Image (cartoon, rainbow, N blue to C red):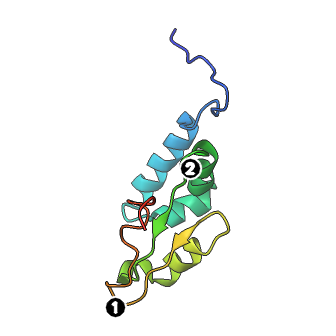
Amino acid sequence: MLTDESKEGRPESVVVPQRMDAVRELIMQDLHVTYLEMKASLGIKVFKEIKKNNRQHRTIFHHDNADCHTSAETSRLLEGPEIELTGHPPYNPDLAPNGFYLFPCEE
C-alpha cells in the first residue's frame, strides 16, 4: 500500500476522496452548478487555503472592472478580508497599474 509522508507546514490532505465524491455528485445532479454553489454547500475555503499554504508568495487579484468582475456575486467575494486587490481606474489604461507587480523594483 502506498502512503504519503507527512511534511511540516503542509496540510495532511487537501484533496479528500469524500469531498471529491461530493463534488462529482453535485455535478451529476446539476451540470450547470457553479463554483459558488459548490462552495456554499460543501464549505470549501479556497482563498484561505491559498493564503495559508502560500505565505512567502502573496496571491494578488487584479480587479480591472471587466463586466464579469463587477457582478454582484464577484464583488461580494472580492470584498472579503482574505483578498487583497489592486485597484484599476475605470476606462483609463494610462493610469492602470498593469505592470506594478510584474516590475516591483522599478519606479
The amino acid on which the numbered mark 2 sits, given as a three-letter code, is: Ile
Q: Looking at the rendering, which quadrant does residue 32 occupy?
A: bottom left
Most distant residue in the front direction: 107
| In front of the other: 56 or 34 | 56
* In the image: residue 9, left or right of residue 77: right
The image shows residue 83 at horizontal and vertical percentages of: 59, 65
* In the image: residue 74, left or right of residue 56: left
Above or below residue 61? Residue 97 is below
Question: Residue 50, which numbered label?
Answer: 2
**Classed neighbour count for the residue bearing mark 1: other residues with Cα under 10 Å, few (<14), some (14–19), many (≥20):** few
Which structural element holds mark 1? loop
Above or below residue 42? Residue 70 is below
Of labels 1 and 2, earlier in sequence is 2
Which quarter of the figure is the C terminus placed in? bottom left
| In front of the other: 99 or 54 | 99
Please tell me which residue is depicted at 42% across the width and 67% down the height of the picture.
100
The image shows residue 48 at horizontal and vertical percentages of: 63, 54
Q: CA distance from mark 1 to mark 2?
A: 31 Å
Question: Residue 91, which numbered label?
Answer: 1
* In the image: residue 101, left or right of residue 9: left
Please tell me which residue is depicted at 56% across the width and 36% down the height of the picture.
16
Question: Residue 52, which numbered label?
Answer: none
Above or below residue 89? Residue 28 is above
The image shows residue 54 at horizontal and vertical percentages of: 57, 45
**Classed neighbour count for the residue bearing mark 2: other residues with Cα under 10 Å, few (<14), some (14–19), many (≥20):** some
| In front of the other: 77 or 57 | 57
Number of marks in the image?
Answer: 2
| In front of the other: 103 or 43 | 103
Most distant residue in the top direction: 1
The amino acid on which the numbered mark 1 sits, given as a three-letter code, is: Tyr
Which structural element holds mark 2? helix
